[in-house]
Image (spheres, helix red, strand yellow):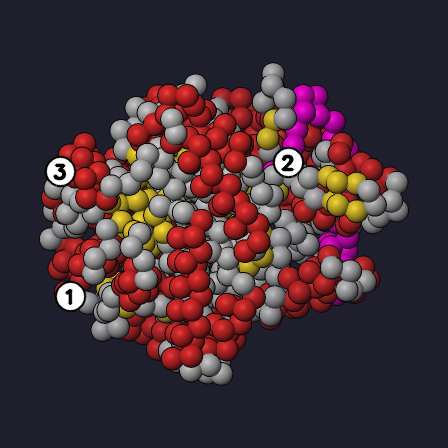
Amino acid sequence: MVAHNLGYPRIGSQRELKKACELYWSGKTTYKNLLQAGRNIRQESWTLQKQAGIDLIPSNDFSFYDQVLDMSLMVGAVPERYHEVIISKNNSELDLYFAMARGYQKDGLDITAMEMTKWFDTNYHYIVPEFHKDQPFRLFATKVIDEYYEALQLGIKTKPVLIGPVSYLLLGKEKESGFEGIDLIKNLVPVYLEILKKLDRLNVEWIQFDEPFLALDLTEKQKRGFTYAYSEIRREFPHLKTIVASYFEGLRDNIKLATTLPVCALHLDLVRAPEQLDEVLAYVPDKMTLSLGVVDGRNIWKNDFSKSLAHIEKALSKLGTDRIMIAPSCSLIHTPCDLDLEKNESQLSREMKTWMAFAKQKLTEVSTIKGLAVPATRPEFSTRLAENLWAIESRRTSSLIHNPTVKERVSRITDADASRTNPFAKRKAKQKSELKLPLFPTTTIGSFPQTTEVRSWRAKWKKHELTDSDYDRLLKEETEKAIRWQEEIGIDVLVHGEFERNDMVEYFGEQLSGYTFSSNGWVQSYGSRCVKPPIIFGDVSRPNPMTVSWSSYAQSLTDRYVKGMLTGPVTILQWSFVRDDQPRSVTTNQIALAIRDEVSDLEKAGIKIIQIDEPAIREGLPLRKSDWKTYLDWAVKAFRISASGVKDETQIHTHMCYSEFNDIIDSIGAMDADVITIECSRSQMELLDAFAEFKYPNDIGPGVYDIHSPRVPSKDEMVYLINKARSVVPADQLWINPDCGLKTRHWDETRKALIEMVKAAHELRSPVEENAV
Ligand code: GLN
Ligand code: ZN
């Protein structure tokens, strides 16, 4: 039996890589220093894994930016626009690589970055390969060999990790029509063979191909791609020990395909899909080894050893010890590095720490589970088993986790709780006479620029260098300025500006029971960017109102309406580490009830318009299409529970910031928000077609300008866009707003842009007919 790991966080336990890259990008450190920082991180993680008892340690899981971009460089899929970067400017290969990731504005060149998108259903973002018809591939970069060699020098024989050829192609985007990514498989595989030949010369024993697509919906052609690629590899290198790793889903209808691939080992994610084990065992051919991914690579909870051992025992009787590998469910890059670094007990209590394992701790779990699974070594590990049983039991029964009142309330949720009293048409009429808003009402999405100053107040306040009352006073002043300024330029529905919030999920997490936080639990989001997700450990409830004082204060300053501003239950769930002891839907319902109470309290405090942001609904979509409906049903219902406790006159807004609505438009309709504001400007209102076709009945604010860029749009541009919108959506359904919050912008450009936006609304209002398209 072998204990192995699929990949280790490369950002460094103190975010060393982030710091080194950012220094290098700003020209404050040398190329040599950056390379050394990379070497240090690799050496540390290899040593750590060795000490933890991992038999097969991965290499090439390190990356200066992204593992998919590493592959693009390896196979020479460098889009033409970057060729000048390396040829004419004497840049290094790494400079070219960073140019692809981040764009290149230097030496008179202005080259855009490659696109970035989410890595399956995680919060990690990868750089999307760009493919053309007849795309040539050639061996261009040899990082995988260099790192294997580097580890060898340190006395560690690693298992190089590559993204498998099929998944690499399916991760890319076709830049012209008339072909599919998978058509390129015959061009691509020879480059893999070339790399393998070089690795083979260095006596590589094991090699891991990550093929997450093996657990997703596949076309026949894609399936043939798998068989082709791995048959070629087997034919050229019959002695090489190959592992194909599936993760994030079960193999389901691809079990036959996966078990007939000519590979030595197949990795299964038994955390996400434990049920697949029985069927895989029924199909697995003689000689094939199974790698059992029993330790959760996506969450921070301690492994339940007895549960893992039950899986392994099942496999043991069929395969014997020699054909079993023990591993985390997927690469550990989705978990923070090291729980031992959490020293602040007021933040993460000692008791809660006994329930958790970060990446480093998960390594020890993997080797311990192996120790327990092998009869000969079992006695050595018996104390650890006892400790584990105790920790699991203590978490299961802890009074910190269980709140009977919350559980009871969730069990009593009815369909009526998830429905407004009257249908939209009736509500709209009542809201019209109550609110008396003009045609094309203007608003913003919630946040205003968080200046360095505002952030420095918060930092000082957290360090107790600023008293509560001083912090409060400063924020109030800032809020008042924002209100006055919005009045001055003539926005119709104001916002308070969210100056008191650090992050739209953390702010609520900090005030909800059932939430805790790490001090150093950073996880890579993309490149050098990391996030520190809050942790939901127990039943969620709201001990006190969370936003009412800020909204009431802002409303007290003005005669115009100020929107209450909340984050929705699905987004709060999606951007946190969640409990693994109950379904996500149950946790979401608990959060939904807390938000519902907040909405009611805002209404009682006289707030007439309340926005519940749900930017993360779409990214929670399951990876397999057949699971979408179940998810969308509970996600939409949770939103409705949070929004439906108010009277008809109270106007509920929601906001989403992504531009692919077509496939979930029914569900967006079913959310039944009175107004939805959405990102639109980059796709020039095209996505409104989905709303038009669906005859979306409620009000819509299609973003009229892109807040992701400092560029100030002109009034005319925005008039043009709204007129375009009017050609598909009736004018009295339209709102005018930017496409997302303005937190990351500067005041200067924000003011200019919003002044233009208000001018656009005025022009559109008078006279209506003249502007119609
Ligand atoms: N209300 C939030 C803001 O304006 C919405 C942010 C988001 O959509 N991601 O910052
Ligand atoms: Zn947004």
Residue drawn where x is 65% and y is 32% of the image: 130
Residue pointed to by mark 1: 404
728 displayed left or right of 610:
right
* Residue 167 falls in image quadrant: top right
Q: Which three-letter amino acid code belongs to the residue tagged 3?
A: Asn
Please give the range of residues in magenta.
128-155
Residue drawn where x is 29% and y is 55% of the image: 559
Does the numbered disc 1 mark a residue whose Cβ is under 8 Å from ligand 1?
A: no
Disc marking residue 422: 3
Residue pointed to by mark 2: 129
Q: Nearer the viewer, mark 2 or mark 3?
A: 3
Q: Are marks 2 and 1 in contact (CB under 8 Å)?
A: no
* Residue 198 falls in image quadrant: top right
Q: Based on the picture, tell me whether residue 146 belongs to the magenta stretch.
A: yes
Q: Quadrant of the C terminus?
A: top left
Does the numbered disc 2 mark a residue whose Cβ is under 8 Å from ligand 1?
A: no
Q: Which three-letter amino acid code belongs to the residue tagged 1?
A: Pro
186 displayed left or right of 655:
right
Q: Identify the mark nearer the N-term, 2 or 3.
A: 2
